[in-house]
Amino acid sequence: MKMRLLTLLCSLWLVLPLQAAIDTHEFATKSESDRYRKLIEELRCPKCQNQNIADSDAPISMDLRDETYRLMTEEGMSDEQIVDFLVERYGDFVRYKPPRDSRTLVLWYGPFVLLGFGLLMLVVIVLRRRTGSQEKTDNQLSGDEQQRLATLLNQSRESTDT
């Protein structure tokens, strides 16, 4: 009996750190709640770097969730205004999809340029190998030339044998 109680207490002790933070924000309508959920899932945690603020338990994420809630309910800002406010404060990093502008051209189009360069190099290598194999076949002797070479080799062998 004591062993079962000890096992139960130990398992509860191990589960306690797994509790996640639960937001207690209340909304007037389901659409506002959905809008809030969508917004916090689109924004990246500045500390965690690869989690959105909905999934992160970092203090900065909790503050950003509270700020998003405040901006939605008290300030009445639109989604774009909220995102612009947070981008102004934390930079483009808080967005999972950075804007397409002159600062992010490499980010958006760099992979396609590298892919095109790689395909171009592949085509060049294949063409060089093909022309190299054609040069080898062009350097082969014709039937008449092979017979003449064979007679010359036979003559040189006969002259060395005697």
Image (cartoon, grey):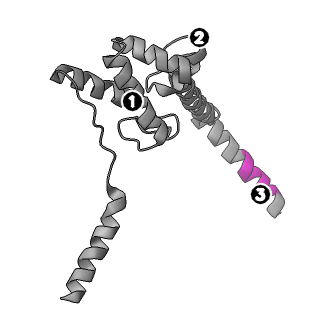
Distance CA(mark 2)–CA(mark 3): 79 Å
Disc 1 crowd rating (10 Å Cα; few below 14, some 14-19, many 20+) is some
Inspect the magenta stretch and tell me whether residue 113 lies in it: no
Mark 1 or 3: the one toward you: 1
Mark 1 or 2: the one toward you: 1
Work out whether mark 1 precedes mark 2 in sequence or the reverse, and give the earlier one: 1
Inspect the magenta stretch and tell me whether residue 153 lies in it: yes
Identify the magenta region: 152-159
Rendering quarter of residue 69: top left
Q: Secondary structure at mark 3?
A: helix
Which residue does the image show at 28% across and 72% down from the upper left? 11
Residue highlighted by disc 1: 66
Q: Is residue 41 left or right of residue 64?
A: left
Work out whether mark 2 precedes mark 3 in sequence or the reverse, and give the earlier one: 2
Mark 2 or 3: the one toward you: 2
| Disc 2 residue type (three-letter) | Ser
| Disc 3 residue type (three-letter) | Glu
Disc 2 crowd rating (10 Å Cα; few below 14, some 14-19, many 20+) is few
Residue highlighted by disc 3: 158
Q: Secondary structure at mark 1?
A: helix
